[in-house]
Image (cartoon, coloured by chain):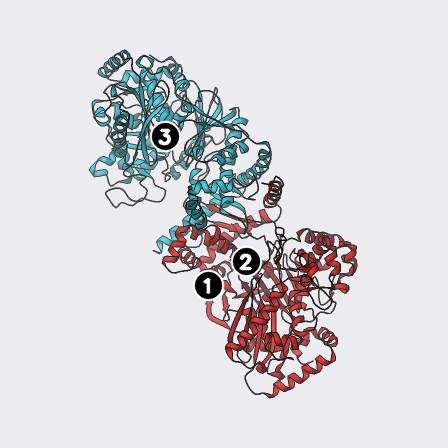
Chain colours: A red, B cyan
Amino acid sequence: MRRPGVLAGGGDHDAIGARQRPAALRKRLRCGVLREAKVGKRKYAIGVDFGTESGRAVLVEVATGKELAAAVYPYQNGVIDETLPESRVRLDHDWALQDPDDYIRTFKRTIPAVLKKTGVDAADVIGVGIDFTACTMLPVKADGTPLCRLKELRKHPHAWVKLWKHHAAQPEADKINATARQMGESWLQRYGGKISSEWFFSKTLQILDEAPKIYAAADRLIEAADWVVWQLTGVETRNSCTAGYKAMWSKQDGFPRDEYFAALDPRLRGVVDEKLSRTIVPIGDKAGEITAEAARWTGLRPGTAVAVANVDAHVSVPAATVTEPGRMVMIMGTSICHMVLGREAREVEGMCGYVEDGIIPGLFGFEAGQSAVGDIFAWFVDEAVPPQYHAAARKQKLDIHALLEKEAARLAPGESGLLALDWWNGNRSVLVDVDLTGMLMGATLATKAPEIYRALIEATAFGTRTIVDALDKNGVPVNELVACGGLPEKNALLMQIYADVTGREIRVTASKQTPALGSAMFGAVAAGAAAGGYDSIFDAAQKMARLKPKVFRPVPSSQAVYDRLYSEYVGLHDYLGRGQNDVMKRLKAIKAEASEGRKKKGK
Amino acid sequence: MRRPGVLAGGGDHDAIGARQRPAALRKRLRCGVLREAKVGKRKYAIGVDFGTESGRAVLVEVATGKELAAAVYPYQNGVIDETLPESRVRLDHDWALQDPDDYIRTFKRTIPAVLKKTGVDAADVIGVGIDFTACTMLPVKADGTPLCRLKELRKHPHAWVKLWKHHAAQPEADKINATARQMGESWLQRYGGKISSEWFFSKTLQILDEAPKIYAAADRLIEAADWVVWQLTGVETRNSCTAGYKAMWSKQDGFPRDEYFAALDPRLRGVVDEKLSRTIVPIGDKAGEITAEAARWTGLRPGTAVAVANVDAHVSVPAATVTEPGRMVMIMGTSICHMVLGREAREVEGMCGYVEDGIIPGLFGFEAGQSAVGDIFAWFVDEAVPPQYHAAARKQKLDIHALLEKEAARLAPGESGLLALDWWNGNRSVLVDVDLTGMLMGATLATKAPEIYRALIEATAFGTRTIVDALDKNGVPVNELVACGGLPEKNALLMQIYADVTGREIRVTASKQTPALGSAMFGAVAAGAAAGGYDSIFDAAQKMARLKPKVFRPVPSSQAVYDRLYSEYVGLHDYLGRGQNDVMKRLKAIKAEASEGRKKKGK
């Protein structure tokens, strides 16, 4: 047990995890550590970040956190949401799959590329960490073979990886929630009272409901995050982050009891023991070491330490310098994931969850989210910005977002007269309702695209404020914000609006690839100090993580206007989101009927 | 007294009007009539329609209503809403003026053009009618000279014509309403309980408030409609349509009492006697005859009959074949004006007004309206339709509206999942509130422009249905709809949606220039049967007005879906429009403050 920092929060599980590893592997591990510790040269770690459209490897100097090279592999089969690869099997609306071989190809293409770019000797790479989207899960055989790789199951949609944004399991999520409420399951409150259709057991139950043969054929059901670590190390581990945030597991109580699963479906009674594992390895632990096969894929040395899998958002927290309560990390991209640490368990409405050891060992990690942020701006630019702005952007040699930001920045807060509800993809926190939809109010014949663009930014900032307020009021202080992801880099207006709306100072991570950096940090921790890495993520964060000097500070006059707009936002948020007027849900129901009716008519 | 049909509703006023005319003129009138009656040739009438951007003359065959030629004059100074012509005097937000000389130029350019085009002998043109936007009003000297034509007043904005859509008199309208409520003025109920900022005394009071010198310099304050008739005939008349709908006059009670005006402002006590006239001439009457000067402008014969001025919307009713209760006429263009006739006075919430003899002599004319319809679609196309649709329209050689209509027509009712409130320019009926704004709900990341386009069409249809329902429930039956204006010509989908939403059959006028045809019909009535015209508008409508054969019939399955969507519309309409949540008004107030604040900072 090398790392007391990690042990503090998860010693037992680490011990169990270690016990499961073959003796030969444990031996190789110790040898590797000893050999590498002898070399006085600079050490490196590699972080691999598995995104929605591509995978990315970053090679990082362990002592400084300096990112020396990155390589991206755009998935060959991308997001599979229309037809399955190599067949014409059509997918239903709301489906989103991936090809697990795209993950293997990511290793094969990106790790050799960063080694080659930097000229770093593989012997000096002491650790690898990975992070993934979640819940992204797949059914596999006992040896880890994905069911979709089997010829006889390849044409079956349920045999493939269900991507995080696969939204077809809503009926199952509804059943999970209703049953849990009915049976008074206490774990439900950890998740703000609602389990999402995106999560592990919603997806699992959908497989069972719709494809019982696939369910039966699956020896294991596993997070893609854990699956890729398995492929690298030959060891099946289950990480505490996805187990806690996506699979209703807690360090204290484990998984929900078998009776609960049986109530969902008798065939599900033994799901944990049959297809998952009760052995959950805490974040910050080592999963295993690069196998000979993985060494051939990657060019790394067999025996290189591999960290337990992590989630893209959660792994970013220490990479954003945050290893203590009070500072919220926002991963701002197509959506926003909000994470803050606390010393105690607290029940906060509409959180995605709180998990002990879920982000940083020894602390409770609170997670909330907005299901669409950058996605709304992208939608707006693609579907609602007229040609004259695109032409102006070309003329000024600006990206269309940059042009709209520039125009929107000329307006004073409140000057657009517009107010939006940022529910283009439902509401994740605090309402946890996928059936809510986007709304724009205040339009006049004089309304222009940059005004709407600004109103959409403001709406997402109001969405973040509802989350900050919910946490703050329930004993999870949020004193300061740290942003990372694509948006903060691109849009200074957005950052200022978030500061003004939340009344909090915001700083931005120095790294442009925070998740990959975070994964590399965990890779360095998996290697340990003796091998030239670190003994805890706290140490790693101090040395490897950095923020930019720029601070976005709330402007009091803007804050005053936004306080008024926010109270209007809250009024509509509650009226339309808390059941006073369920018009949005009824519109969705009418939409579904109408769409179904038209299809039946064969129009 | 030649025309009993007209006399039925307005004999007294006609007599008074006639008494005012100089004896010489009356003599010329009789001579003209005698001479023309002798000629056996085909007779013609000319209708001149003064719109917002241009004036249009149409030459019509009296016997058949056949439109032989049209000519349009785009106003040289258009809508004046930024700076005054020939000076750099800037106008405030919400101002909209016109140049009265553009009206004279309309006569000079268009009437000679239609005569020339058709080769019709001016001797065979028996009558001229005009219609105008309303309330469009101006201050003039006793001889009719507009104040803005005087060098010393030309740089003063209040000296110019205030166009119907001049919206800067809202504080005055508020005062007019508050004072009327306070004093228990019974006429207020005729206008649905609210006088608009667009109307005559709102604009009058704004002149007095902001430019008392202009008010003092004005010998007369007059509707532009009546002013152009004055310019043609040398006779100042005041028509019952604008007096009734825009100036709080009624046949039974006349204008509000002097004490009421004095309560608004002591200087306003004598406004009716000093600057208006208590002599109101009913629609369908003759105003006078073409003067020698007007004959030089137009090429018409001096002595040609000129009808009392009318309003573009109201004059369209008989031109749409409607001279009886039960059939509502919708003039559908940038906005919609709804008109229906009734046998009795009825108070209906939020009507623009009901006026005896206001549309058709002997009947009560009920008017309602939607302040933006085509304007919303135009806004959408200009400000919110992305390049790919414009490119597709070019490729398919379609107008962008036609392309969007084609795409939107593929959707089933309700399939967009969207619902809008059609308040981009406030709500005229039934809420009568300019501070309401547009709203769109139901947007998702998959929402496309044609879906929004359809939702906007549906929203305007729901707006029409609230009006139809308000009338129908209050004893003014609406059994069938007749549409005219630009929109019905262009958009068959829109017509079908209106039929489905209102549950009424809709027919469309055969004429594409209904107001001008209506004006020509009134010109033929002004001439009288003895001169080859008609003795009443009832006769003229039977011979000169026609509908297209196509009938838009409600489709029961669509009606059923729209009934559900309409009840959602009503829910939001009432919540946001009837004071439960005045968020729209507060957003407007914040917007005004923010805009003001930014200007002060000189940004």
Q: Quadrant of the N terminus of chain A?
A: bottom right
Which residue has dot 1 on it?
A490
Chain that bears disc 1 = A
User: Dot 2 corresponds to which residue?
Assistant: A465
> Is residue B142 placed above or below A76 in the rendered structure?
above
Is B532 displayed left or right of A250 in the figure? left
- Residue B240's place in the image compared with A180, above or below, is above
Q: How crowded is mark 2: few (under 14 residues within 10 Å), some or many (20 or more)?
A: some
Within the image, what quadrant is residue A296 found in? bottom right
Place of residue A289 in the rendered image (x, y in percent of width and height, measured from the top left): 66, 77
Judge depth for marks 3 and 2 and give the one in front: 2
- The chain letter under disc 3 is B
The answer to whether tags 3 and 2 share a subunit is no
Label 1 close to label 3 by CB (< 8 Å): no
Residue B167 or A601: which is nearer the viewer?
Answer: A601
Q: Mark 3 points at which residue?
A: B261
In this view, B36 is above or below B204? above
Q: How crowded is mark 1: few (under 14 residues within 10 Å), some or many (20 or more)?
A: some
Residue at the image point whose x is 23% and y is 22% from the top: B291
